[in-house]
Amino acid sequence: MIDLRSRIRDVPDFPQKGILFKDITPLLSDPRALAEAVRRMAETVVPPEAVVAIESRGFIFGTALALSWGVPFVPARKFGKLPGKTVRQIYSLEYGEDTLELHADALHAGQRTVIVDDLLATGGTALATTQLVEQLGAKVEALLFVIELRGLGGRERLASYPVQALIEYEVAEEPR
Ligand code: AMP
């Protein structure tokens, strides 16, 4: 079994002072480790009927998972990027707010989805994505992450859903 943790690089004070950024590019540059990460993520849940992945690093793992399960890939994008009719969800950041969108026809009522991102911190981004999926009447069966920063309340915020992460870190302070 490959030590995936050794393929995550800590970058202090990026993108701003006080943030310990978890850089996944060493994992991406190692095809065996990347394949193992995707395989392990795929094994943690019952295959869904669609993968909803969060812009932008979630797309890397979400695409691979959708292909491995043979199910549709649905991008959750930042405001203004999707050309068709959309549903929107505003969510809070430490300073200010942001908006995520899904194409309104991307999912159908009752469709079983899994939400994918690279990293879970406070859970605000992931929770907004669950709300988008549910606006379309689809179901969130699980949320999958490569990395979980524990101690920031993400798992607690997502308490009504199964949450899985390959690598966990205990952190004491806000990541951003
Ligand atoms: P949150 O909404 O607080 O759970 O933040 C999750 C999103 O922010 C994910 O899309 C991550 O890619 C990004 N993020 C937050 N903190 C970090 C960190 N320390 N290192 C890398 N990415 C992060």
Image (cartoon, rainbow, N blue to C red):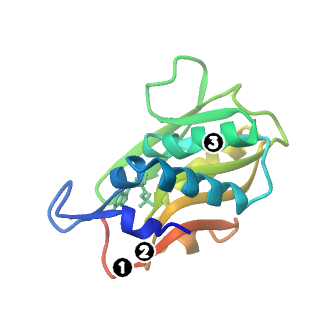
Q: Is mark 2 within 8 Å of ligand 1?
A: yes
Residue at 52% x, 17% y: name it: 83
Residue 145 image position (x, y, % from top left): 54, 59
Residue on which the image places disc 1: 171
Residue 93 can be seen in this image: no
Report whether 19 appears left or right of 89: left
Circle 2 Cα neighbour tier, 10 Å, few/some/many (<14 / 14–19 / ≥20): some
Q: Quadrant of the N terminus?
A: bottom right
Instruction: Determine which quarter of the picture holds residue 135.
Output: top right
State how far apart marks 2 and 3 are (Cα). 23 Å
Q: Amino acid at mark 1?
A: Val
Nearer the observer, disc 1 or disc 2? Answer: 1
Residue on which the image places disc 2: 152
| Label 1–label 2 contact, CB within 8 A | yes
Residue on which the image places disc 3: 52
Q: Secondary structure at mark 2?
A: loop
Mark 2 or 3, nearer chain start: 3
Q: Amino acid at mark 3?
A: Val
Residue at 67% x, 27% y: name it: 104
State how far apart marks 1 and 2 are (Cα). 7 Å
Residue at 58% x, 43% y: name it: 62
Q: Amino acid at mark 2?
A: Leu
Residue 144 image position (x, y, % from top left): 61, 58
Residue 75 image position (x, y, % from top left): 57, 34
Q: Secondary structure at mark 3?
A: strand
Circle 3 Cα neighbour tier, 10 Å, few/some/many (<14 / 14–19 / ≥20): many
Q: Is mark 1 within 8 Å of ligand 1?
A: yes
Instruction: Determine which quarter of the picture holds residue 137.
Output: top right
Mark 1 or 2, nearer chain start: 2
Report whether 41 appears left or right of 24: right
